[in-house]
Amino acid sequence: MADKAESLVTFIQERCLWQFVSRAPDREENIDGVLTLVGILLTGGVPKLQTPMDRLHFANANHLVTEIKTEFPWITQLGKEELFAVVTGAIKRIHGLTVKNSKNGELHQPLY
Amino acid sequence: MGCSVTQKARSGIINPIFNCQPAGAQYAGIGVKDCIPLVHGGQGCSMFVRLLFAQHFKENFDIASSSLHEEAAVFGGIKRLEAGVDSLVKRYPDLRVIPIITTCSTETIGDDIEGSIRKLQRMLKRDHPGRIVHLVPVHTPSYTGSAVSGYNVAVQAMVTTIAKKGEANGKLNVFTGWVNPGDVTELKHYLTEMGIDATILLDIESFDSPMMPSKDSFTHGSTTVEDIEGSANAAASIALSRYEGYSAAQYLERIFEVPATLTPTPIGIRNTDIMLQQIQKITGKAIPESLVRERGVALDALADLAHMFFADKKVAIYGNPDLVIALAEFCREVELKPVLLLLGDENGGYVKDPRILNLQQNVDYDMEIVCNADLWELEKRIKNKEIELDLIMGHSKGRYIAIDAGIPMVRVGFPTFDRAGVYRNPVIGYKGAMMLGETIANTLFAQMEFKKDREWLLNTW
Amino acid sequence: MPMKLLDCDTLIPEREQHVYIKEAGEDTTQFLPISNAATIPGTLSERGCAFCGAKLVIGGVLKDTIQLIHGPFGCAYDTWHTKRYPSDNDNFQLKYAWSTNVKEKNVVFGAEKLLKLAINEVFDAMPAIKRMFIYTTCSTALIGDDPKAVAKAVIAERPDVDIFVVECPGFAGVSQSKGHHVLNMGWIHEKVGQVEPKITSPYTINFIGDYNIQGDTDVLQRYWHKLGIQVIAHFTGNATYDECRGMHRAQLNVVNCARSAGYIANELKKKYGIPRLDIDSWGFSYMATGLRKVGDYFGIQDKVEELIEEEEDKWKPKLDWYKERLKGKKMAIWTGGPRLWHWTRAVEDDLGVQVVAMASKFGHQEDFEKVIARGREGTVYIDDGNELEFFEVIEMVKPDVIFTGPRVGELVKKLHIPYVNGHAYHNGPYMGFEGFVNLARDFYNAVNSPLWALAGQNIQEGL
């Protein structure tokens, strides 16, 4: 399961820009927002999109899910709990890579 | 009626005719071999100029920056300058000359360049014993003069720093002014034909550099440290430009008693005649028959064009001042009518320039010479219909004026990036006059065909 | 592997922290080049200045605005005839350079009077133009002029004009990047919100970080038009001053160049709650992805799929023709910063090309996070590359083509390596579907020119 989460993380790292926005809080917001939706969409759920940010996360998540399904056919075979574990693992990893352990010194500047 | 000299009335500039002083200083610096100019200021002062040179020559020139950052505004920039010299000397073992070119920022801050150079020379002695690197202070703030004076200041600075009294070498120093490689080729040809041993300052023929199978050919100037050292021991100097390089010749005369002659910029038949006769007088070498023939070929070609296609055609000319004045004189030789000359900086000397006084005395039609001009002075006269032009002669940054007004334009001067290979051709000398004439003619011909304006004239010319 | 000290940098070992060669299993929490740091003087770095980043990159693109440069005239001269951003306003923004023409006496006694005079001269000379940007430069920043006060005074006297002042002297920051930042921040804090745009569609965006190089904006605008999306403001390709004052009314900010204009997108989110959607508008596949994201945001997926199908039908066969012939070719990218991460994966996926070396002039660490995540192993990643490093890297990776500026291109030509203009393109536009085909075409024609083989032959050694 760890390998699977890791391959998903690598895929997301290679393809997505939303995880690399300018500041830590914005990155965290995007990572949580997009990947939570990815989890929902992968289980066939219908996301509730109320705010503009919800719609942004959906915009970043929807096509990504199509790509993930193509790249990782096993993901549609996973049960809900396993999928939850993979996605949660990915969220944690990406937080680590792009926020917590990032060497990017600008992330924590208070102003843009 | 007649030639009047006016001044631009506006204080601001719309479309400057040339760049500021540091750019001219860099143009002088790149003419020297084993030399990397270090521009002491913001990164733009060197980076933009490297781009400008690349646009004109389609070549890369090595120019460094002291990369002034904000703390220099408070603490001064000397540390950056010293670090810059240090980086260059360490990483470029063949480097022999570093012109240190100041800019508006570092002049405003008031960095002590000369003091820094003394310190750097001590550091060099200590850290690189046996290595000689000439550090040349070149003071060229951008809020004075222009690229024209910047070039002049830099040539003089390099000569002042490097020229060294030694044994007389019997050579002729030739201060070319701001010319193109094609001009240097033409000059060298004359000197060879006349059997004269000369030092060309600056020898930029090699700017037109090749792709070689060995992949080791890069672009640089050819004037060596030894050439500049030896300039102090020449038999004489001749300067081809009043505003670009003559000061260095005067310096050599003052300090090393090398007699200096200023000749009118040799564009056109008469100006070339005068230059060759001056050289003959100075060196005692006769003008050979071959050059008389070349002159004849040029005259022959121009005679086909002058009264048929050029007569009464009104021309506007802008660019470096010596170039503009000399082009105006050439135009008059071939019956073109220069009606508007634009001299682009605040140099008060233009109104006393004997060539301009001569135009004022002899021109019998309406001609205006605008001093301290910018290109808006040209554009607005065209837009307001104060002037009707058949031809514009100038550099590529004025191209939209010509394009939008539908006026034929011959690219001449610097930069000429919107036409291919212009820098490879001379404008000086007999060949230059001939090629200028033919380029003007072909430009007018293309316009005739494009506008379907009596283009059938050419059916049987 | 740890950061790389190139041979030519042995005597300036600080450079080691700026050069990285990616290896399997590594990520940017371990190795990330230092970026946006002070330049080492005298290295022949490729960097320009803050004034360049403000005026030449962003401000000067506006098609209806006078760009008055407060300083000696060189800064104006140098940022004139150095870009290829056309407009549908007869290319007004390409034709002029305006300077207050500061002289020595102004440096000594102050230049505010001169500035006021020059502002009025220019508005008088060009009465059809009512908008102006004023930029400070090294000298006018040092002498402590207050151009904002002068601008305010002029606006009071000429109520039909508006003026925006950018304080971006060349020595500010460490590169062009500071100029981007200052202009972005000034604009959002002082000008956005002053004009109410007319809303003509239920879907409104700003397109941020695209400067209409060779018509890029026009390519994208055709897509938005087909999708029925109103672009309130392009920031700043083919844009007007007042369009950019209405940015607060967009529902979504679509960002291409996050480096030069991410700042204003961030501030628009902070101040007006407008979400920031980052896309790549270069790249054949990337363009489709970007359009899909916009489609998902607005719920107009069908229209988007229709557009994508149309574009792919038209352009994919040509792209594939080039892909067949460019597969395996090695490319280097030495540009400002973002094109590194925009292009590295796009050329790999869409053209089978491998990017083997990349150098950024003014990218920040954020740009390196992106490019290293997207880029290949074995590739060299350089922050603030300099000329000797370029030579050494060429020896290491032996690229078939280098996407870089014309001057560096003319340098590598001596090594018989073709270049394609990575800043202003050879034959662009390069954005969008058709743009990537143009890029492929220039790439193909560059590497297949018979001149390289001829250059390598020494006629003294027989044919």
Image (cartoon, coloured by chain):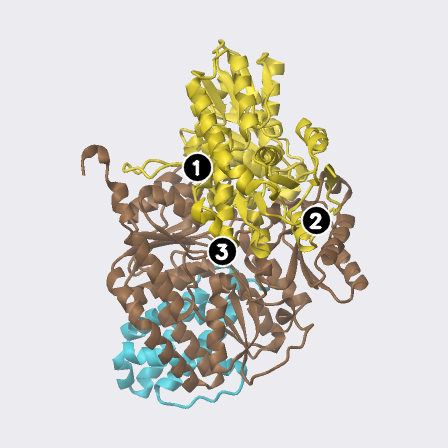
Chain colours: A cyan, B yellow, C brown
Of label 3 and label 1, which has the lower sequence position? 1
Tell me: C220 left or right of C109: left
Tell me: C387 left or right of C105: left
For mark 1, name the chain.
B
Q: Do the residues labelled 2 and 3 touch (CB within 8 Å)?
A: no
Mark number for residue B424? 1
Residue B359 location (% of width, % of height): 68, 32
Q: Which of C76 and C136 is in front in this view?
A: C76
Q: Nearer the viewer, residue B183 or C108?
A: B183
Mark number for residue B450? 3
Question: Pointer 2: what residue?
Answer: C100
Q: Can residue A60 be seen in this view?
A: no
- Disc 2/disc 3 C-alpha distance (Å): 39 Å
Q: Which of B56 and B447 is in front in this view?
A: B447
- Residue B150's place in the image compared with C322, above or below, is above
For mark 3, name the chain.
B
Q: In which quadrant is the C terminus of chain B drawn?
A: top left
Camera-nearest label, 2 or 3: 3
Label 1 secondary element: helix
- Disc 3/disc 1 C-alpha distance (Å): 27 Å
Q: Are the residues under marks 1 and 2 on the same chain?
A: no
- Disc 1/disc 2 C-alpha distance (Å): 35 Å
- Residue A66's place in the image compared with B173, above or below, is below
Mark number for residue A55? none
Say which amino acid is labelled 1: Arg
Residue at 63% over, 40% down? B338
Residue at 51% over, 64% down? C212
